[in-house]
């Protein structure tokens, strides 16, 4: 009897033991480079297939491994088997190099700054959807997927996370799970391959089925957490500022365009005016700092996140931003300084300190100017330099036949630094001479390529703009509705044209003119060209080639490149790579001037300080091309947006005098006091 009880106890214990999941996480990190760790879940018991609930929103519940994980980060996953037994595993990715340690220190700082100062939602809402499309789970280019059989009939009701199909992944069995309660609609048949070929012959995950809900429910991320959208503080700050300036200046962003075109043509250029460059050269120098990778990658990001409707809000943001550009560049010329050699220094550092001093706010002015200068220097090394060099190298080395370049980033950086150095050593006059030739060429090449695709689809233009307007006001719930699409459009426009950031006023301060208002009127053309014209053309290319509706798995600059290649042929990849390198080059030389003026404002306008800054700047060109800096680079890039906080505050305080100056200037133009010279 005792023997029987003992055997029975052992049997029950073994059943209980087997019911408990057992496993561990294994971590591999093949090099000291940042964000390249690999983590794998190993399960030794329980009944598969398993579900994996990671603490990363982008990680699917089907994934038993993660790639490109940041060193020093905490990884957590809960594994659930078919009996709903669960196992919680967590680990911290070890740090093995100085670069990884730098990244682990900077990441929390960057996340805090991004969350609290830039992207903390003033208003937020949950994203709701009325259906959910189910695609090939955990898709991989190297893995073959096929549908074995459906476990639920077409049109049947299903429950959330109910197994609805068996899928063969290579030789392994896995389940496809429903997301939400609703009615299942099948889109493939047993035996079908679960991928389709994209326009570039790349494998893409196939749509397998969709679940139609009885009523809207919360949208779920790949790890089955809910999605929220909100209005970031920085976007509200920029938009409200632009709206305030538009009203305060009585719609100067629209009524000033005809006069701006006359100024750019040189109709009012007086050769005896003080300054270093013409109106046109100042315009293209500032444009070279804004027309760039934001137009190639930024529009693609906006459309992939917000659909075609994001384009409408980018256009609106560009039109409003024209008023911000006008007021900051007007003040830039008004409060600039000239040394004994006729070298101009101007920009927010000067109008914040000198302009607010006139209004008995000397202390506030100095603080705002100091903060702006610090941010501007950081931005010139990061977003205006390393990011540009890094993306230029990525575009160049991604061209078919040039993949071998990927291992020689440092040499690309040295070559880029050499050409940048030749230009910036000569100062603003040298920069202007290059940009007034490079910018028209690079914009011309890009715009011509876009126009060819647009004219090839000229009969579809009406429908394309219909999609843009309809998407702006009837956005799908999955994109966050109208508010979600508006946020994406305004945010990407802010990154693209930098209206309200104050950087362009540094370049415009060097214009040859005695009329500071005239230069502000010239400057208002920048957001129009950058966002309203160039970004809209990019959006039309994405719509005509079908990538706006289905990004085909591509993101950012890669999405735009493949859209052009689809519309024009494979040779367009070379054109876009060439344009990207030119964009990056022109942006770097412009930002070198912005950073230099902020540097000399803080450390003195001496030859020694100028040369020290230029050497450091060129060093960062090489650095940006040869290594990935992760959060360090993101932090530097955010400094560009950070410049808007002190700048817009100062612009609001000084807007009254700009309005009076504008009224006086326009009266003198109408009465002929200000004469044409051509």
Image (cartoon, rainbow, N blue to C red):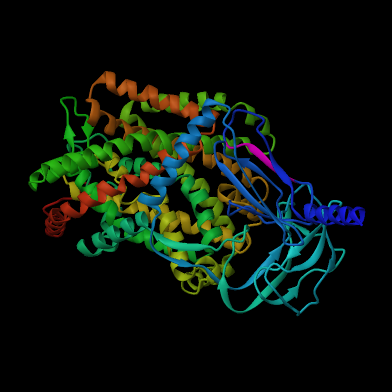
Residue 597 visible in the displayed image: yes
Q: Position of residue 54 (x, y in %)?
A: 62, 52
Q: Give, as a single range, the part of the protein colored magenta.
A: 35-42
Q: What residue lies at 47% left-to-right and 59% top-to-bottom? A: 536
Residue 242 forms part of the magenta stretch? no
Q: What residue lies at 58% left-to-right and 41% top-to-bottom? A: 577
Q: Position of residue 673 (x, y in %)?
A: 11, 53
Q: How many marks?
A: 0
Q: Position of residue 91 (x, y in %)?
A: 61, 41
As displayed, is residue 482 above or below residue 538? below
Quadrant position of residue 634: top left
Residue 213 shown left or right of residue 438 in the figure: right
**Magenta-drawn stretch, dominant element (helix, strand or loop):** strand
Q: Give whichever of 136, 459 is nearer the camera.
A: 136
Q: Give whichever of 393, 461 is nearer the camera.
A: 393
Residue 623 shown left or right of residue 426 in the figure: right
Residue 142 shown left or right of residue 525 in the figure: right
Q: What residue lies at 40% left-to-right and 33% top-to-bottom? A: 381
As displayed, is residue 134 above or below residue 48? below
Residue 37 forms part of the magenta stretch? yes
As displayed, is residue 186 above or below residue 564? below
Residue 41 visible in the displayed image: no
Quadrant position of residue 8: bottom right
Q: Position of residue 42 (x, y in %)?
A: 74, 44
């Amino acid at each position: 009897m005792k023997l029987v009880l003992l055997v029975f106890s052992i049997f029950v214990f073994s059943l209980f033991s087997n019911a408990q999941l057992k496993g561990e996480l294994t971590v591999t990190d093949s090099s000291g480079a940042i964000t390249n760790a690999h983590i794998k879940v190993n399960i030794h018991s329980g009944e598969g297939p398993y579900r994996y609930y990671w603490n990363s929103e982008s990680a699917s519940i089907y994934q038993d491994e993660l790639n490109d994980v940041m060193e020093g980060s905490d990884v957590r996953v809960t594994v659930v088997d078919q009996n709903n037994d669960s196992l919680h595993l967590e680990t911290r990715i070890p740090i093995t190099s100085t670069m990884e340690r730098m990244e682990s220190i900077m990441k929390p700082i960057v996340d805090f700054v991004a969350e609290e100062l830039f992207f903390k939602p003033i208003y937020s809402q949950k994203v709701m959807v009325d259906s959910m499309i189910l695609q090939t789970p955990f898709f991989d280019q190297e893995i073959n997927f096929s549908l074995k059989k459906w476990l639920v009939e077409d049109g049947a009701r299903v429950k959330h996370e109910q197994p609805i199909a068996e899928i063969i992944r290579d030789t392994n069995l896995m389940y496809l799970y429903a997301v939400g309660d609703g009615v299942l609609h099948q889109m493939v048949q047993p035996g079908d391959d679960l991928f389709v070929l994209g326009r570039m012959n790349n494998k893409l995950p196939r749509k397998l089925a969709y679940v139609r809900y009885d009523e809207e429910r919360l949208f779920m991320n790949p790890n089955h957490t809910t999605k929220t959208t909100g209005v970031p503080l920085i976007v509200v700050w920029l938009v409200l500022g632009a709206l305030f300036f538009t009203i305060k200046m009585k719609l100067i962003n629209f009524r000033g365009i005809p006069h701006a075109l006359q100024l750019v043509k040189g109709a009012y250029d007086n050769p005896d005016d003080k300054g270093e460059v013409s109106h046109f050269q100042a315009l293209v120098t500032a444009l070279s700092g804004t027309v760039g990778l934001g137009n190639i990658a930024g529009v693609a990001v906006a459309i992939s996140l917000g659909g075609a409707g994001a384009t409408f809000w980018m256009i609106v943001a560009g039109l409003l931003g024209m008023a911000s550009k006008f007021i900051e560049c007007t003040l830039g010329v008004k409060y600039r300084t000239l040394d004994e050699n006729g070298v101009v220094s101007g920009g927010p550092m000067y109008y914040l300190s000198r302009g607010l001093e006139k209004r008995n706010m000397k202390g506030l002015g100095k603080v705002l100017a100091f903060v702006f200068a610090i941010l501007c220097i950081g931005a010139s090394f990061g977003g205006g330099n390393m990011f540009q060099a890094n993306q230029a190298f990525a575009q160049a080395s991604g061209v078919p036949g040039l993949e071998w370049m990927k291992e020689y980033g440092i040499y690309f950086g040295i070559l880029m630094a050499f050409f940048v150095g030749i230009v910036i050593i000569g100062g603003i006059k040298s920069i202007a001479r290059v940009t007034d030739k490079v910018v028209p060429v690079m914009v011309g090449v890009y715009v011509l390529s876009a126009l060819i695709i647009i004219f090839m689809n000229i009969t579809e233009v009406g429908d394309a703009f219909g999609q843009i307007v309809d998407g702006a006001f009837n956005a799908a719930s999955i994109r966050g509705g109208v508010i979600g699409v508006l946020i994406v459009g305004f945010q990407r426009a802010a990154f693209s044209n930098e209206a309200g950031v104050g950087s362009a006023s540094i370049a415009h301060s060097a214009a040859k003119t005695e009329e500071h208002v005239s230069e502000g009127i010239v400057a208002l053309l920048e957001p129009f060209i950058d966002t309203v014209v160039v970004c809209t053309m990019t959006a039309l290319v994405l719509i005509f080639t079908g990538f706006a509706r289905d990004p085909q798995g591509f993101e950012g600059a890669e999405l735009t490149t493949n859209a052009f290649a689809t519309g024009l042929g494979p040779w367009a990849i070379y054109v876009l790579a060439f344009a990207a390198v030119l964009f990056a080059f022109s942006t770097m030389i412009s930002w070198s001037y912005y950073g230099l003026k902020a540097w000399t404002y803080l450390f003195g306008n001496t030859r020694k300080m100028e040369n020290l800054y230029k050497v450091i700047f060129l060093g960062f060109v090489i650095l940006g091309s040869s290594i990935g800096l992760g959060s360090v680079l993101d932090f530097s890039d955010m400094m560009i947006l950070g410049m808007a906080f002190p700048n817009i505050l100062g612009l609001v305080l000084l807007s009254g005098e700009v309005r009076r100056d504008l009224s006086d200037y326009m009266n003198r133009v109408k009465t002929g006091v200000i004469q044409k010279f051509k």
